[in-house]
Image (cartoon, rainbow, N blue to C red):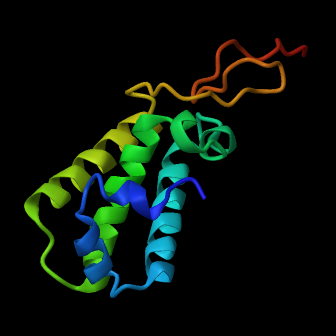
Amino acid sequence: MFLTKNDLFSHIDEKLVNQLSRYNDNTVDEILLTAEATVKEYLMQLYDVEAVFSTTGADRPKRAVWWCCCIASWMLYKKAQVNTPENIKVDYQDCLLTLERICDAKQPADLPRRVNTEGEPKTKFRWGSQPKRSH
């Protein structure tokens, strides 16, 4: 797994994580996997998500960990059905806004790019023209 329960402690106190999850590590793991899948969906058009999310420990891209933790923190509060603190809401909204901008190629991310069959970075734009037609 890309994220661990300990990663959430940068956003939420350990005791609070345990209380919100009702001391159920399976709940936390489910939320972490869902948050990871959410981030992958935003990045998959332009970035090599397999390369990003196969890393572990200190090799993990810091921004990808941050995005996953922001989403997971928000999801943990929603699952517990308690009032979400303002800082968690703001982090979540900022995270989604950033991911949307990255997905739309309006903001770069320091992550490995997907490459096409020629080994060039895959983009949302096509350069060049169609071959001339012969009538």
User: Relative to residue 23, is residue 129 drawn left or right?
Assistant: right
Nearest the camera: 62 or 120?
62
Please say if 130 is above or below 122: above
Spot occupied by residue 129 in the image (x, y as percentages of width and height): 71, 14
**What residue lies at 11% left-to-right and 66% top-to-bottom?**
85
Q: Residue at x 90, y 14 (%)?
A: 134
Q: Quadrant of residue 7?
A: bottom left
* Location of residue 49 by image quarter: top right
Q: Quadrant of the N terminus?
A: bottom right
Q: Measured from the top left, where is residue 115 in percent x and y?
A: 72, 26
Residue 21: where, in percent of width, then height?
34, 82
Task: Examine the rendered structure and indicate whether residue 62 appears above or below residue 83.
Answer: above
Q: Is residue 133 above or below residue 68?
A: above
Horizontally, is 63 left or right of 77 in the view?
A: right
Report the front residue among 46 and 60: 60
Q: In this view, which residue lies farthest toward the left?
A: 86
Q: Give left or right: position of 26 versus 106.
A: right
**Which quadrant would the C terminus be assigned to in this image?**
top right
Percent from the top left, x then y, of residue 8?
Answer: 35, 59
| Outermost residue toward the front in this view | 15
Tag count in the figure? 0
Question: In percent of the image, x 45 and y 29: which residue is there?
Answer: 105
